[in-house]
Image: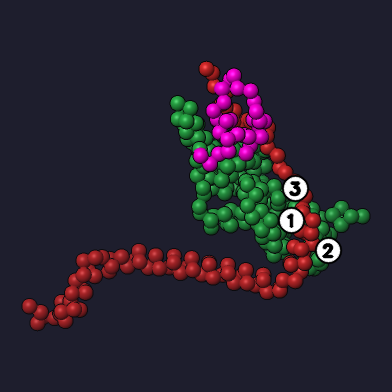
Chain colours: A green, B red
Amino acid sequence: MREDDQDLPALLARVRQREEAAARALVERLHPLVARIVHAHLPRGQDEADLRQDVFLKIFVRLDSFRGEMPFEHWVARVAVNTCIDQLRARRARPSVLWSDLSPQQQHLLTERASDEPEYPREQLAWELLQRLLESLAPAERLLIRWLEIEQKSIAEVCALTGWNSGVVRIRAFRARRKLKNLYKTLELDANRTQT
Amino acid sequence: MKDKKPGFDQFIELARRGFNDGDLDAPPGFAARLAARWADAPLGHGLLALWERTVSWGAAVTLAVCLLTAWFCRADFTATTRAADGFADFAGLDENSEETP
């Protein structure tokens, strides 16, 4: 039997006894969940490994406070979300995205005309551009846009993963979407200016 | 000529279709390194975190007490009172004294 196939309570009990093999199995088991959350906070992959490591160390340190009142994955997601927000809040600087910062392909997405032949997959360009725009938003806003708009999670799922109530999620998501829309419109205006 | 550039909603729709999570599996050795680092960490790490939390709560409570004190004693802290007291101290005047001109 593989290490990560065994049931979770037994694995957690072994980690609480500071068993290294169990800790390794737990990291492997939780890695996709944590990586997805960290990646949503750091859209372009900066320092991802460091942040993932911090999340896991925090999970280990706080493991004793997990009482099983909620699914373990939800508890882990909350630790990950809070760690990411705390870390990124300290950085303050959120680069604004300028037209001149975009790659020629990304600029093409915003200037193409109906007669243009598609040179690059538009979906991929849009996803790359969205990741750039998300860097200008606050950490929690990035996460909400990613979960609600891109992964199309429900409000209830986001509440379960973050521990926020639905009102908070709705308001933050609304603000995040408005900010993102304004950023996109600014780029559109720049695109129009360069065309004329 | 008609534009093909996407509006905001269409842009989000395109991004949704272009979205990929990338590789979510742990890179080789990541889990082993992390587990070893955690296993080697001194147990005092938890106590340190507890101490950190106590200190920040302590600072918050102190600030709250200071603000409350300032609020309840605000009458004694008005600018006029402070200026008059300062001048009286400087001039050696006692406003309750009958000798004061």
For the magenta stretch, what is the residue range?
A100-128
Tell me which chain the residue with mark 3 is part of. B
Where is residue B75 drawn, in percent x and y?
27, 66
Residue bearing mark 3: B24
Question: What kind of element bears circle 1?
Answer: loop
Query: Image quarter for residue B99?
Result: bottom left
Contact, CB < 8 Å: mark 2 with mark 3? no
Q: Quadrant of residue A152?
A: top right
Marks 2/1 same chain: yes
Residue at point 72% right, 49% down? A33
| Amino acid on which disc 2 is placed | Ala
Residue A106 falls inside the magenta stretch: yes
The answer to whether the residues at label 2 and label 1 have Cβ atoms under 8 Å apart is no
Number of other residues with Cα within 10 Å of mark 2, as a class: few under 14, some 14 to 19, many 20 or more: some
Image location of residue B54, percent across then percent down: 56, 70
Residue A68's disc number:
1
Question: Where, by quadrant of the figure, is residue A15 drawn?
Answer: bottom right
- Looking at the rendered image, the disc whose residue lies closer to the viewer, 3 or 1, is 3
Q: Which residue is mark 2?
A: A21
Disc 3, disc 1: CB below 8 Å? no
Tag nearer the camera, 2 or 3: 3
> Quadrant location of the N terminus of chain A?
bottom right
Q: Secondary structure at mark 2?
A: helix
Camera-nearest label, 2 or 1: 2
Picture residue at 24% right of the left edge, 70% below the top = B82
Residue drawn at x 53%, y 41% is: A101
